[in-house]
Amino acid sequence: MAQGYARIGRDMYTTDIEVGGHKLTGDEPPRNGGQDAGPAPYDFLLAGLGSCTAITLRMYADRKQWPLEAVKVDLHLARGDDGTVITRTLHLTGALDAEQVARLADIAERTPVTLTLKAGARIDTTVG
């Protein structure tokens, strides 16, 4: 389904990433000892959730021929006493009625990445 790699050398903590044939750079902010050369790991997690949400809503609205002009997904990850919580706020632009807005909010709760995060994923680690 998806495949990629991440490689780090002696750089503090710049990481070369390739996923889906796209080359990315990950890093940590200076406060964590990095150079801020790219998003931090949790930033990539939010990026995946946000893009999956926006794409899924766009696909659904297009299929239904709804007047959805744009989707903006605001995301915030926080850790608290009750665990890690991601707050997602949808901003939907277009002449949508209340029923369409409610349906899109419902669809957002069932995007592939949303369901994966809510269910958790088993990670099998080996040393090659």
Image: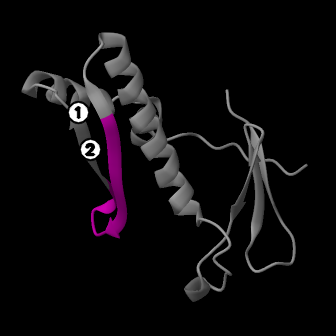
Instruction: Estimate the x, y position of residue 10 in percent, counting from the top left.
Output: 86, 78
Instruction: Farthest residue to the right: give it.
Output: 128
According to the picture, the residue beneath numbered tag 2 turns out to be 90
Pick whichever of labels 1 and 2 is earlier in the sequence. Answer: 2
**Rendered location of residue 35, percent (x, y):** 68, 81
Compute the Cα span from label 1 to label 2.
8 Å
On screen, residue 64 above or below 73: above
Q: Quadrant of the N terminus?
A: top right
Q: Main secondary structure of the magenta part?
A: strand
Q: Amino acid at mark 1?
A: Ala
Near-viewer residue (128 or 55): 55
Task: Look at the image and give the residue range highlighted in magenta.
Answer: 70-86
State left or right for residue 24 relative to residue 126: left
Instruction: Tell me where residue 71 sits by quadrant.
Output: top left
- Neighbor class of circle 2 (other Cα within 10 Å; few <14, some 14-19, many 20+) is some
Q: Is residue 59 above or below residue 118?
A: above
Rendered image: mark on residue 7: none
- Seen in the picture, residue 2 relative to 30 is either above or below; the reply is above
Helix, strand or loop under label 1: helix
**Which residue is drawn at the image coordinates 8% and 27% (left, top)?**
98
Residue beneath disc 1: 105
Residue 109 shows up from this direction: no
